[in-house]
């Protein structure tokens, strides 16, 4: 009471809590968060892989500070990284295992959770076969977690119906790299952003999704003495487009045609790098023939909406650069022709000799903190160490390395993520184990997915957070999260970063690797076979090193200590490259293809499976915002982030807004035959073209993935998240927008001009 | 082992910029120079790192933002432009926060930083009104205002301010500026950014690098039109003190007239003097309730030299004292001295209300920064005349009451004119008006959110402030004092309600100048 009066009268202004205090490591810091110790670690959000220090006070993380000695982030962190410590003690954490009893999730001991689940799995496998149990994993685990889970699912549960949520983001890059170079593995380094003369960002909104990469672009001018020419290829004028010297507002998902068209112009003009093509690539003849026959500029202008003059200008700029870096993310990958689009970007880089040199490469930027780790050792689409299921040598080699019978190794990849869902629909899969991912927000075509999940006999969710998917689970395995466990993450540039444990896991949570190993004890003999010799994360890491030795993703030269000392190590790291390798496929670095050469591939653009039609005349594009992480399990309780983006919004061009008679702040319904979202707030914006709308996918309250389409890349199985046909219904226009007839082929295009001359605006002549 | 490093205090990250490093190298300041921010809008990608880093550094909760990223958009697709303006304090050469602060809690440090001294702040929040950039922010948890100090403690120790350290684009830097040269030559070109107020108001020092050929920009929060804080203690305080001013004025006038030989008029009396000063005695302490630290209310009079708030506090304090003395003198039978006190009180009271109105005549709040604010504050004094008339009627002084009422009607009529002037001002508001963005939003609030309030306020003013007093004059003339008193009591109560409602609308319809906001969070506070 006295305190209350004192507070009211203003006697105490909490001077202490808001003052600064000297810290020996970082200088002056907030005194309320005066830490007991700093732990050097790595950020657990995205694939950039920033180095940071976790400040620990009273056994809880209270601070995150950028690590100036880390080569990726050089002391900076994005807003999510800066507030990451809050995530660990979020009210949204799951702190104990749970089982659904009488309809309600009830806290139980680990033993009960494991026993119940293992009994159920065994029963289902006995009845329906081994493959009736499936697992969907994540890009959020540590590599040690991935390796452990993969080993147990494939060799313990003996089901190969196992895939990662990375199929929703990186799978096309993986398959595209495999097509071109014979193996997965991004060939570039972030520092290439600092050296390139031309940077082409394709379907990559790095300002929102990878802001720390801007650091390396900002350094470019300091290093090279001139600003790099930045080309941004995107149907939406995202935050990133503001960086562009040339903004290329292509029609949705026409990148492949654009790349082929640029190749046409370059070869037509003789701007290609003949020497490089001859020495380092194969398939040029067929490639050239294919491109010259099918992708003349007029045709490409028609497909992409970019006028011929601008196409020539882009080709000239790109081919004229000594060092051109092309980088892409979800705008390319999340497409039913994602794999081929990736390879088409590789094609363009290859014919201009942009590979394996400083500032010159085709570079896939990863989404999640350890999407790369699961690609390397996750045991989903390949055997750990980039080995093929189909190869007997690879299977036998791997079995010998980990001392298991070779027959135990599956001879082919099981169902991919979307195929698992389809198999559930067919009653082929009856048990699903989901780890650290939230399909109930992140997967396409939600109504179909949710109907499928209802058919499961058991849904097990292993997560650190109470996600929407966890809420409907039959069993929850409560996992530890970032800062509570030890291991490594690999970032986009193949840098293996050490994530050190800073605090004990919250409540009754365990590291994912420990959950898996403990769980395996409920399956006769499996623990002894697979994990008996593995006591802790170091042991697992040692096994990973052994498995990787001699492979492209070679970890054999690494140790936790060396990784920490160097601020991460880019694989391959071995005796020949003790401090890692900055770039793949440089001079003398053969591609893992039969002939050691990169393949030039004749690829074709395909029209969208679902084009606009009278009922649904708008194209829906989905994406992210800097403040939120994926399905918000980690960020929704962090006020600083959430206040800036508390709900989804719909970007609508002013011309469409006028038709709908809505303005910013109004609410609309958006929908198509698959589903709809009510009460979505309108943001009238010139960032989208007329006829196109954008909605971020983070929010379960405005579940935009209810509208997205079950259309998958046949090679990578990646869903076509970015385009589907929708309509918007406003109060004034309850029937929605009417389709506009007679669209003129070849829309206007635009180029930012530094000089005083007018921007290059020209209308494309009709093609025939 | 090399790692982890024991200390980053002197370590230079390999960024080739000020960002990333925890240490900063700055040249020694020469006379006439100060530190300032440089913001490179061509580098900023709108990632909000600076905002998060600032809050982490200073322990502020999410609704206390010292640094904000203003968001704007312009152009036509594909020639669209998103413009981000990361702004904390502009460490102005002529800071409005400092000039207006009644407790002298702001200091312009030698290095140019506009520093807020927490210990002496009383949480009056006048600086949050005065700053044309909405920089100072009230921290409810502390009961005081706080603001960006450019991490001056860190700067002095050679350490990098949090926002500068955190920006991955190197868009925020600390520079040295020669103040005279800046004001003379560069400020009008390099100190400006879209949507920010005129630099001549406070002479901000932030240097901007802007993209070329920016199109017309629209703030991302243009769709958010929300009422300002209602400041209820101030609604009552201002109306009650203005009422007292009117009443004391009447008291003095009555005494003066009787001195001059108008012997039929009622003389000043203890009761009238007491009733006259009573509203101020109630209202003044009430105002302390809007402070974050009421216990320090007395220190509001410190900055008489510069702050209208200090002047108001002092003048109205003296006014109340003189009013009480006047009443006391009447009680003691010293009518002459009482009249002298009433004279002094009237004079000080008029100045006090003028000072009170000047508190609101600030460039940062265009809807307040009009002559009509001063006029309306004085016109509200008619309530005091109604009050005195009521007392006279109760005492049976019919003619005196009628004289006072006639003056009251004049004043109330003036208030009607003030309201009408405001109505036509917003009706004919031109887009060319300097503060069209803010004023048009005030208009929107008046028309959409408070149309009913405004109507009620006007009807009550006409009915209770004019019609009822006129009718009561008939009863007074007839000698029906009971009926007249009832009517006058009703008129006084209703008119007071009308003025309180009017004052409430005055506060809630204010729209500040400042940084553009965020699509959801508006100007990102609370």
Image (cartoon, helix red, strand yellow):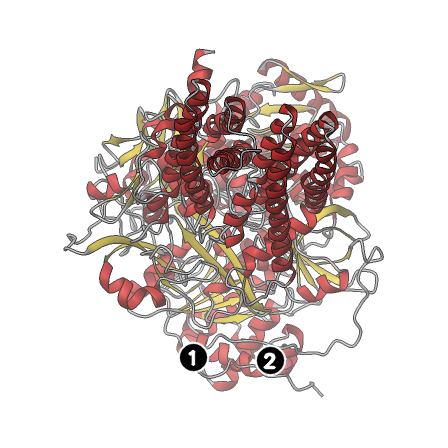
**Quick one: quadrant of the C terminus of chain A?**
bottom right
Q: Chain of mark 1?
A: A
Q: Chain of mark 2?
A: A
Residue drawn at (66%, 45%) of the image: A416
Q: Crowding at label 1, few (<14), some or many (≥20) Cα neighbours within 10 Å?
A: some
- Give left or right: position of B340 versus A289: left
Quarter where residue A739 is shown: bottom right
Does residue A735 show up? yes
A51 vs A270, nearest the viewer: A51
Residue B361 rendering spot, x and y as whole percentages? 46, 50
Q: Which mark is residue A274?
A: 1
Q: Earlier in the sequence, mark 1 or mark 2?
A: 1
Q: Residue furthest top?
A: A1
- Give left or right: position of A49 versus A391: left
Helix, strand or loop for disc 2: loop
Quarter where residue B484 is shown: top right
Residue A694 rendering spot, x and y as whole percentages? 65, 56
Q: Label 2 belongs to which residue? A: A307
B185 vs A434, nearest the viewer: B185
- Give left or right: position of A492 versus A222: right
């Amino acid at each position: 009471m006295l305190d209350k009066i004192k507070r009211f009268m203003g006697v105490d202004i909490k001077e202490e809590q808001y003052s600064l205090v000297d810290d020996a490591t970082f200088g002056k810091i907030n005194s309320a968060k005066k830490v007991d110790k700093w732990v050097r670690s790595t950020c657990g959000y995205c694939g950039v892989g920033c180095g940071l220090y976790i400040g620990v006070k009273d056994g809880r993380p209270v601070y995150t500070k950028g690590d100036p000695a880390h080569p990726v982030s050089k002391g900076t962190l994005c807003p999510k990284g800066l507030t990451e410590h809050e995530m660990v003690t979020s009210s949204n954490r799951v702190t104990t295992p749970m089982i659904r009893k009488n309809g309600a999730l009830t806290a139980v001991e680990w033993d009960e959770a494991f026993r119940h689940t293992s009994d159920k799995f065994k029963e289902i496998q006995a009845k329906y076969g081994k493959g009736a149990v499936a697992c969907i994993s994540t890009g959020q685990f540590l590599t040690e977690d991935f390796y452990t889970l993969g080993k147990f699912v494939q060799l313990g549960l003996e089901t190969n119906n196992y895939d990662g949520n990375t199929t929703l983001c990186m799978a096309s890059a993986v398959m595209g790299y495999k097509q071109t170079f014979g193996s997965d593995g991004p060939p570039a380094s972030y520092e290439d952003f600092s050296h390139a003369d031309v940077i082409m960002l394709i379907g990559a909104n790095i300002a929102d999704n990878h802001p720390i990469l801007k650091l390396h672009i900002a350094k470019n001018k300091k290093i090279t003495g001139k600003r790099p020419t930045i080309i941004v290829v995107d149907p939406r004028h995202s935050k990133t487009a503001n960086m562009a010297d040339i903004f290329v507002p292509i029609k949705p998902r026409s990148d492949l045609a654009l790349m082929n068209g640029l190749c046409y112009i370059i070869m037509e003009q003789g701007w290609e790098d003949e020497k490089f093509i001859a020495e380092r690539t194969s398939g040029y003849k067929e490639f050239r023939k294919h491109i010259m026959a099918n992708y003349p500029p007029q045709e490409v202008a028609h497909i992409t909406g970019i006028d011929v003059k601008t196409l020539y200008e882009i080709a000239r700029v790109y081919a004229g650069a000594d060092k051109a870096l092309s980088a892409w993310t979800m705008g390319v990958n999340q497409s039913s022709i994602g794999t081929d689009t990736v390879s088409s970007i590789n094609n363009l880089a290859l014919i201009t000799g942009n590979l394996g040199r400083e500032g010159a490469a085709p570079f896939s930027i990863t989404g999640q903190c350890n999407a790369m780790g699961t690609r390397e050792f996750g045991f989903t689409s390949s055997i750990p160490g980039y080995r093929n299921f189909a190869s007997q040598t690879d299977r036998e080699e791997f079995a010998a390395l980990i001392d298991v019978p070779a027959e135990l190794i599956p001879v082919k990849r099981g169902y991919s993520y979307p195929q698992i869902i389809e198999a559930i629909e067919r009653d082929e899969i009856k048990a699903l184990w989901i780890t650290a991912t939230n399909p109930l927000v992140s997967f396409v075509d939600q109504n179909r997915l949710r109907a499928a999940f209802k058919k499961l006999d058991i849904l097990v969710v292993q997560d650190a957070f109470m996600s929407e998917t966890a809420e409907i689970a039959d069993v929850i395995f409560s996992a530890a999260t970032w800062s509570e466990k030890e291991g490594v993450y690999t970032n986009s540039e193949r840098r293996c970063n050490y994530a050190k444990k800073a605090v004990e896991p919250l409540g009754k949570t365990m590291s994912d690797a420990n959950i898996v190993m403990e769980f395996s004890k409920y399956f006769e003999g499996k623990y002894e076979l697979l994990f008996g010799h593995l006591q802790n994360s170091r042991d697992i890491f040692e096994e990973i090193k052994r498995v990787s030795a001699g492979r492209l993703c070679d970890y054999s030269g690494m140790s936790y200590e060396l990784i920490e000392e160097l601020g991460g190590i880019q694989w391959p790291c071995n005796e020949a490259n003790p401090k890692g390798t900055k770039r793949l496929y440089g001079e003398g670095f053969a591609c893992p293809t039969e002939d050691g050469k990169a393949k030039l591939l004749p690829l074709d653009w395909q029209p969208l499976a679902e084009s606009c039609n009278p009922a649904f005349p708008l194209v829906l594009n989905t994406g992210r915002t800097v403040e939120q992480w994926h399905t918000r399990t980690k960020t929704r309780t962090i006020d600083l982030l959430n206040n800036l983006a508390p709900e989804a919004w719909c970007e609508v061009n002013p011309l469409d807004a006028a038709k709908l008679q809505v303005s910013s702040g109004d609410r609309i319904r958006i929908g198509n035959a698959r589903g709809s979202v009510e009460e979505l707030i309108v943001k009238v914006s010139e960032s989208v073209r007329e006829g196109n709308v954008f909605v971020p996918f983070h929010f379960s309250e405005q579940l935009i993935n209810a509208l997205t389409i079950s259309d998958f890349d046949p090679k990578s199985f990646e869903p076509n998240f970015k385009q589907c046909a929708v309509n918007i219904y406003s109060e004034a226009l309850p029937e929605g927008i009417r389709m506009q007839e007679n669209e003129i082929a070849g829309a206007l295009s635009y180029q930012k001009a530094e000089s005083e001359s007018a921007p290059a605006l020209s209308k494309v002549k009709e093609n025939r | 082992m090399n790692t982890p490093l024991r200390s980053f205090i002197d370590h230079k990250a390999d960024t080739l910029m000020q960002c990333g490093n925890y240490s900063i190298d700055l040249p020694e300041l020469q006379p006439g120079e100060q530190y300032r921010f440089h913001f490179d809008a061509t580098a900023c990608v709108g990632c909000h790192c600076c905002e998060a880093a600032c809050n982490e550094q200073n322990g502020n909760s999410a609704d206390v933002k010292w640094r904000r990223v203003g968001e704007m958009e312009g152009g036509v697709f594909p020639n669209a432009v998103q413009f981000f303006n990361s702004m904390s304090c502009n460490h102005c050469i002529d800071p409005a926060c400092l000039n207006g602060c009644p407790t002298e809690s702001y200091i312009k440090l030698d290095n140019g930083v506009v520093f807020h001294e927490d210990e002496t702040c009383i949480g009056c929040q006048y600086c949050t009104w005065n700053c044309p950039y909405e920089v100072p922010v009230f921290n409810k948890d502390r009961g005081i205002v706080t603001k960006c100090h450019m991490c001056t403690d860190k700067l002095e120790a050679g350490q990098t301010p949090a926002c500068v350290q955190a920006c991955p684009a190197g868009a925020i830097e600390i520079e040295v500026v020669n103040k005279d040269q800046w004001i003379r030559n560069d400020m009008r070109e390099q100190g400006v950014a879209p949507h920010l107020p005129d630099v001549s108001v406070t002479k901000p020092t932030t240097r901007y690098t802007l993209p070329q050929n920016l199109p017309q920009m629209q703030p991302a929060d243009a769709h958010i039109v929300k009422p300002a804080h209602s400041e209820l203690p101030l609604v009552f305080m201002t109306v009650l003190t203005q009422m007292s001013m009117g009443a004391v004025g009447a008291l003095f006038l009555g005494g003066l007239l009787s001195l001059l030989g108008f012997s039929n008029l009622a003389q000043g009396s203890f009761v009238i003097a007491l009733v006259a000063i009573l509203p101020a005695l109630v209202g003044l302490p009430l105002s302390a309730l809007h402070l974050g630290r009421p216990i320090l209310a007395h220190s509001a009079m410190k900055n008489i030299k510069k702050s209208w708030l200090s002047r108001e506090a002092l003048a109205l304090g003296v006014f109340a004292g003189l009013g009480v003395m006047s009443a006391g003198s009447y009680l003691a039978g010293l009518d002459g001295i009482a009249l002298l006190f009433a004279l002094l009180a009237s004079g000080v009271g008029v100045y006090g209300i003028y000072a009170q109105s000047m508190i609101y005549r600030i460039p940062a709040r265009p809807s307040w920064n009009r002559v009509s604010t001063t006029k309306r504050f004085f016109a509200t004094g008619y309530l005091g005349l109604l009050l005195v008339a009521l007392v006279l009627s109760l005492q049976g002084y019919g003619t005196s009451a009628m004289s006072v009422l006639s003056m009251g009607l004049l004043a109330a009529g003036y208030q009607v004119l003030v309201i009408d002037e405001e109505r036509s001002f917003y009706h004919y508001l031109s887009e060319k008006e300097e503060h069209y963005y803010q004023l048009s939003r005030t208009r929107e609030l008046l028309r959409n959110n408070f149309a009913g309030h405004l109507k009620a306020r006007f009807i009550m003013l006409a009915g209770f402030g004019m019609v009822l007093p006129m009718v009561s004059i008939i009863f007074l003339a007839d000698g029906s004092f009971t009926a007249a008193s009832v009517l006058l009591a009703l008129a006084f109560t209703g008119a007071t309600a009308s003025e309180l409602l009017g004052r409430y609308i005055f506060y809630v319809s204010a729209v500040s100048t400042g940084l553009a906001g965020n699509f959801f969070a508006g100007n990102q506070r609370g």
